[in-house]
Structure formats: structure tokens, C-alpha cells
Image (cartoon, rainbow, N blue to C red):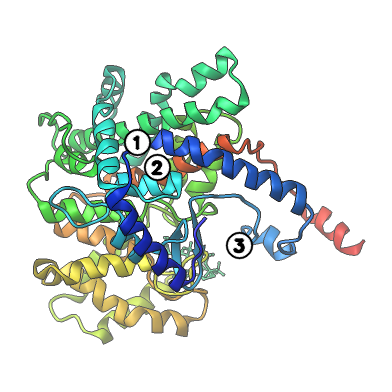
Amino acid sequence: MFRSSSSATARYVSRACAQRRFASTKTVREVLEEVVPKKQLQLKQLKTEHGQAVLGDVKVEHVVGGMRGLKAMLWEASVLDPIEGIRFHGLSIADCQKVLPAAPGGKEIIAESMLWLLLTGKIPTEAETRQLSRELAEKGELPEYIEKLIDSLPSTLHPMTQLGMGVAALNHESKFQQAYERGIKKSEYWTYALEDSLDLLAKLPALAARIYRNIYNPGKPLPKINKDLDLVGNYVNMLGYGDNHDLTEYLRLYIAIHGDHEGGNASAHTSHLVGSTLADPYLAYAAGLYALAGPLHGLANQEVLRWQMNMQKELGGNITHESIKEFLWKTLKSGQVVPGYGHGVLRNPDPRFMALQQFCDTRPALLQDPIVQLVKKTYEVAPAVLKEHGKTKNPYPNVDAASGCVLYHYGLTQFKASHTAYYTVIFGVSRALGCLTQYVWSRALGLPIERPKSLSMDAIEKLIKQ
Ligand SMILES: CC(C)(COP(=O)(O)OP(=O)(O)OC[C@H]1O[C@@H](n2cnc3c(N)ncnc32)[C@H](O)[C@@H]1OP(=O)(O)O)[C@@H](O)C(=O)NCCC(=O)NCCS
């Protein structure tokens, strides 16, 4: 939608800033009503005029190698460049930090302005962002049966399992599913998908905060949703940290920039696949959450914290670059991966990691925190060790190398056992922005059910001989 060269982006950014001062306030639905027909036409033209154009070869290494690099999926909101990192409709994280509205009294991007950009490809005005915040806050309370369901679960059940269960059960509310049963036209699917997606996004903070309360502060009253706060402001409040402005700002930034990472990652791809069966957005996102719960994906933020804390314990008071290097080699020689390093697509330090580091650099309290310092020191050593080890294609940190450790500093220290660690739930709240955006677009574009062709090894050998 937007060109991604830096001068084009700069022009776009300054034009967008100017437009922001004069634009009228629209709802996200109204903007989508304008954008959808244009994108439908674009897809129609792609299919009719370029349907047979070749985008790449399918090699045996793709089939047996997790489809790495295979261009085989449509995803509208963001595209990941191996070197530059993520761009949301052409805008880098730094561009977004310049043009997307923050919360009143805050500086960081918020979930609502990122959601608006992901859904529409346009930059919301301040007023449009506030209007969306208000709408989400008004829809944010959980139905009683969900509260009862979550309260009935054992506190030893992993928070991600609980989150997925709550999201799936919310499909009792699905307007998409009800409309489908009534027999609506295919062209109307996306409007119901949008309503469900906004409803689900609105309820995620209350659901996720209830899980946190039940596991770590049982019996503590949960604050009501404040209609004047943004989504993450309310989330932090319900988690019990509402008086911590820095944590609120950190989570605003983290949730916004972590909201989408193109479509091929496991959670996005899973929710896309499940959505393609016309399962409603709640079921599709619940499926995505269970992909996120794996240690090679979303659980990595908890694994990093566990690993850095073990490092801290083992190396004691005097941690040097040399002792970190030895610890890294010990991890690698024991056959484990270094959590928070490597990536399926990226071949440079993750700009999301760099944005979180920049956030830390502006806060002296964070810079003095031992675990945050250790993350920084590890970054100074790990890429060289991983290069020497020679296996990973990307020896640099990804966003999870820092994210959980910063939360630890801010008081989310409940890490008695991996099976009850909460950090990935916050990632789960964030990634809903991208997965649900694509759900809406997949229905607007009438994308079909996914059905790639699989082959057995014998069938592959036969094809090679032919
Ligand atoms: C993210 C990840 C799953 C990507 O996997 P991938 O696309 O298969 O990565 P590569 O192609 O670079 O993997 C090639 C080899 O390097 C290894 N490797 C990759 N990252 C590694 C790491 N951080 N530490 C040690 N070895 C690593 C792989 O396990 C693989 O080994 P194998 O050939 O014995 O199977 C992988 O880098 C990883 O496990 N990282 C740690 C977990 C993590 O941080 N996940 C969050 C990602 S956002």
C-alpha cells in the first residue's frame, strides 16, 4: 500500500502528519468501507492479469525444511524484510513512532493506533484513536460464563492454556457465526468478522488480567474498565500496576510493535489456516494462541528470562564478557538453543529488540537493573559466539531477548515455575492485532480454504526421477 523506500516513507510521514491536523473523524468501519473495494479490485486484477506469474521455485528443501522462504501466502498488514525488519503497510517501527498517536500523557504508540494502521493502511487522527479506545473500553467487560470458566481452572494450568480456552469459549458471542448460520452473502462476511474482532480485542485485557489475578493474587478485586483509558492502560490497571506509568508505556510500545510480524510465523499462519475454514475469529485466534505457546515461538520470552536468571545464578557477582561467553558455549554444547537469538526470516538484529533497548536507554532505573544489564551484556557477546558455532542463520537477538526481562524489572517477577509463567500471555494479547486484522481481510478478499499439497518421501523421489 505504501512504498517502502526511505525517501518515499519520509514524504509519506510528513504528508501524514499534515493530514492528521485536518482530517475529519471517521470510524474504523467507515474507513474500511472505502478501502475494501479498492483492495478487492487489486486482488481481482492480480488473479486475472498475473495469475500465472512465477514468484519462486518449490524445492525439496522447502518441503522438508518447514517451508522456509517459500512465498506461498497472502498477508496484508505487514511485510518482513530479512535485513530491515518489519514494516507495517510500508512503515518501519521508527516511522510508526513518529506518526501514530500515543495515549494522553504518553509518548509510545498504542494498540489502537497500530490496529487502525494494520486494518486500514491509514494513519488515524488523534480523535479517531480516542474514539476507537472508547469503543473498545465500552465492550471490554467479560460475560459472566467466561469469568466462571476461568475462575474454575486450576492455578497450576499454564496461563496460555487458560487464555486459549477463554478466547475459544468467547465464540459463544460470535456475530460472524450467527450471521453465517442465518445464511448471509459472502460479500458481507468481513463486516461480521470485524465486529467479532473488535469485540475480542476489547475483551482480551480483562480475560488476560483475570488469569493473572487468579494465579498470582487470588481473591484480589479486579478494577472495572475505565472508559477514558486506552486498551493497554486498562490492561495494566487490571494487572494491578496502573500506578506505574513507565510499565504502562513499556507495554503500550511492546504490544503495538509486536502486534504483527507478517503471516508465515506459526501463530499467524495457524490462525490464518483455521480462519480459512470459516471458523469464527475467536476459534481462529484461539488456535493461533496455542502455536504461540511453543518454546520456539512465543514462549521464548519466558525461556530467555529463565536462561538469563540461570546465568546470573551460576556466574555470581562478577559477570564478565568472558564468563558470559563460557555460559553460552555451555548452553550450545548441551544441545540447547540460545533463547531469544535467531529467526526464521530476520538476518539482522530485530528492530523490535532495538526499540525495546532504546526504551531502556532512556530510563536510568532500567539501565541499573541487573537482569536488564545482563541482556545488554549478553548481546555484546552472543552474536560472535553463535557465528563461531556456525549453525544458526541469524546470530542476532530477536524481540524476546529483552521483553520478559524488562517485565521482570517492573515487578512481574512471578516465575516460580515455567508452567505458570505469564509473559507469553502479553504476547498473546499483542498478536491478536495482526491475526484478527488478517482474519477481516481474508474474508473481505474472499480467500479460499487453505489446502497445500503434501507429499510422502517416496512420492518426492518419484517426482525427482520423472
Ligand atoms: C527462531 C528459530 C526457531 C528459527 O529457527 P530456524 O528458522 O530453523 O533457524 P535456522 O535456519 O537458523 O536454524 C539452523 C540451525 O541453527 C540452530 N539454531 C537456530 N537458532 C539457534 C539458537 N538461538 N541457538 C542455537 N542454535 C540455533 C537450529 O536449531 C538449527 O539447528 P539444526 O540444523 O541442528 O536443526 C531458532 O532460531 C530458535 O530456536 N531460536 C531460539 C528460540 C527463540 O528465540 N524463538 C523466538 C523467535 S521470535
Which residue in the structure is indicated by mark 2? 432
Vertical position of residue 287 compared to residue 43: above or below: above
Q: Nearer the viewer, residue 397 or 126?
A: 126
Q: Residues within 10 Å of mark 2 (few under 14, many from 20)?
A: many
Residue furthest to the right: 466
- Residue 41 placed where, x, y %? 64, 43
Q: Residue at the spot x=71%, y=61% of the render?
A: 55
Circle 1/circle 3 CB separation < 8 Å: no
- Residue 363 placed where, x, y %? 12, 67
- Alpha-carbon distance for marks 1 and 3? 30 Å
- Alpha-carbon distance for marks 2 and 3? 23 Å
Circle 2/circle 1 CB separation < 8 Å: yes
Residue furthest to the left: 243
Mark toward the start of the polypeptide (2 vs 1): 1
Tell me the quarter of the picture where residue 275 sits: top right
Q: Residue 68, labelled with which disc?
A: 3
- Residue 306 visible in the snapshot: no
Q: Residues within 10 Å of mark 1 (few under 14, many from 20)?
A: many
Q: Residue 406, labelled with which disc?
A: none
> What's the residue type where badge 3 is placed?
Arg
